[in-house]
Image (cartoon, rainbow, N blue to C red):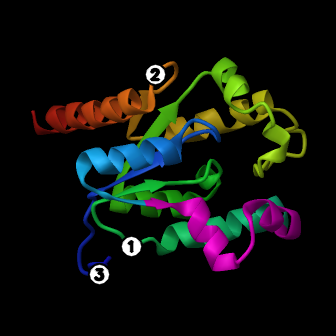
Amino acid sequence: MAQESDRTVRDNIVLIGMPGVGKSTIGVVLAKMMNYDFVDVDLLIQQRMDKTLQRLIDSLGPDGFIEVEGNVLCDLAFNNTIISTGGSAIYSPAGMEHLAQIGHVVYLKIGLDELHVRLPEFAERGVVMREANCASLADLYEERVPLYERYAEVTVDVGGVSITEAAEKVIAALKDKDQKERS
């Protein structure tokens, strides 16, 4: 996709949220519904570094991984694309600022109880834990939710709904936001 250097076009939709919320799955369906492209930032990181996320976290540590992720986020140059970020994208202020410049940031929200059901093997997933005392899914949730809320333009609760319903809720929330801004 071409990048326009003289002006910034905010025609992308950026999905943020906890691991297991469905950013990639909802993103693919959303892209089909809107006739947009789709990109998964976790896959871009793996391709750039030629390692799995878990190997990157193991070899670079959380801070090193966050730096790599932030660099990848800052390099994104897409148009009409659904961008599924990794759950730790919110640890990169520069990356999140860039995402807000190129798209509308949507926080896919889900309750902790439902996350426990979706992520029974949480410890094996390759999740960046910034704080040393962050040992459980509940700790991670408590640490990250305020950051997701800070960066979100729109928050969509996707708990207890199907993937298609979640995508429809995102579209409706963005339309509602757009209508409110125009009036």
Report helix, strand or loop for mark 2: loop
- Nearer the observer, disc 2 or disc 1? 2
Q: Of the residues shown, which amino acid type is indicated by label 1?
A: Ala
Q: Which mark is residue 161?
A: 2
- Label ID, residue 5: 3
Residue range (magenta) = 39-60
Residue type at tag 3: Ser
Residue picked out by circle 1: 77
Q: Amino acid at mark 2?
A: Val
For the residues marked 3 and 1, what is the alpha-carbon distance in whole angstroms? 10 Å
Q: Determine whether 37 is above or below 109 in the image.
A: below
- Disc 3 residue crowd, few under 14, some 14–19, many 20+, Cα 10 Å: few
Give coordinates of residue 114: x percent, y percent. 64, 21
Q: Magenta: predominant secondary structure element? A: helix
Q: Residue at x 27, y 61 (%)?
A: 80
Q: Residue at x 29, y 81 (%)?
A: 5
Query: What is the CA distance from the residue labelled 2 to the residue labelled 1?
Result: 31 Å
Q: Is 41 colored magenta in this rendering?
A: yes
| Mark toward the viewer: 3 or 2 | 2
Q: Position of residue 131 (x, y in %)?
A: 83, 45
Tell which residue pokes out farthest to the left in this image: 183
As displayed, is residue 71 above or below residue 62? below
**Position of residue 9 measured from the top left corner of the image (x, y, whole percent):** 25, 65
Does the magenta run of residues contain 181? no
Mark 2, Cα crowd under 10 Å, few <14 / some 14-19 / many 20+, is few
Q: Alpha carbon of mark 3 to alpha carbon of mark 2: how far?
A: 39 Å
**Residue 63 placement, left or right of 72:** right
